[in-house]
């Protein structure tokens, strides 16, 4: 870092990411970030959701946050998408799958069933 202006720019960039995670949105994405989730790759999945929501211009509609253990460690990384009273649980998530969930489910309301807990347990 070479200047106070550079530090301010970094702060502003990171603040926008925090705002995505804390806004009063109507749709919520929650990534399981307990030890099992982190070791299975949940951190890059969380980052992909934060960046994907911002890039799609959905910051007012969708919040992205993390939680502890969701309770289904064998399916980590686990992501829950809440829309009103409805909850969809996505399992074995990867950064590659995030883009499809954002496009199909979050933007267009179509659940990506092949990534859900129901498909994984069959």
Image: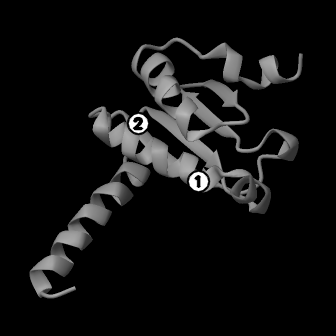
Between 113 and 59, which is closer to the camera in this rendering? 113
* Residue 42 tag number: none
Picture quarter containing residue 88? top right
Q: Determine crowd level at label 2: few under 14, some 14-19, many 20+ residues with C-alpha closer than 10 A.
A: many
Give the residue drawn at x 59%, y 56%. Answer: 43
Q: Position of residue 10 (x, y in %)?
A: 24, 71
* Residue 66 tag number: 1
Locate residue 13 relative to residue 43 in the image: left or right. left
Locate residue 38 relative to residue 53 in the image: left or right. right
Mark 2 lies on residue? 62
Residue 24 appears in the picture as rendered: no
Picture quarter containing residue 95? top right
Between 35 and 97, which is closer to the camera in this rendering? 97
Q: Determine crowd level at label 1: few under 14, some 14-19, many 20+ residues with C-alpha closer than 10 A.
A: some
Disc 2 to disc 1, C-alpha distance? 13 Å
Picture quarter containing residue 92? top right
Label 1: state its secondary structure.
strand
Give the residue drawn at x 84%, y 47%. Answer: 73
Residue 90 appears in the picture as rendered: yes
Q: Position of residue 16 (x, y in %)?
A: 28, 57
The vertical placement of 59 against 66, above or below, is above
**Circles 2, 1 touching at the beta carbon (< 8 Å):** no
Q: Quadrant of the N terminus?
A: bottom left
Give the residue drawn at x 67%, y 56%. Answer: 33
Give the residue drawn at x 87%, y 42%. Answer: 74
Q: Position of residue 103 (x, y in %)?
A: 43, 21
């Amino acid at each position: 870092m070479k200047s106070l202006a550079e530090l301010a720019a970094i702060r502003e960039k990171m603040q926008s990411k925090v705002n995505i995670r804390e806004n009063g949105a109507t749709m919520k994405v929650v990534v399981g970030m307990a030890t099992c989730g982190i070791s299975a790759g949940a951190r890059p999945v969380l980052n992909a959701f934060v960046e994907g929501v911002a890039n799609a211009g959905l910051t007012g509609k969708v919040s992205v946050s993390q939680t502890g253990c969701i309770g289904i460690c064998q399916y980590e990384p686990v992501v829950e998408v809440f829309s009103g009273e409805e909850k969809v649980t996505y399992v074995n998530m990867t950064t590659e799958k995030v883009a499809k969930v954002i496009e199909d489910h979050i933007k267009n309301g179509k659940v990506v069933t092949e990534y859900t807990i129901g498909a994984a347990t069959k």
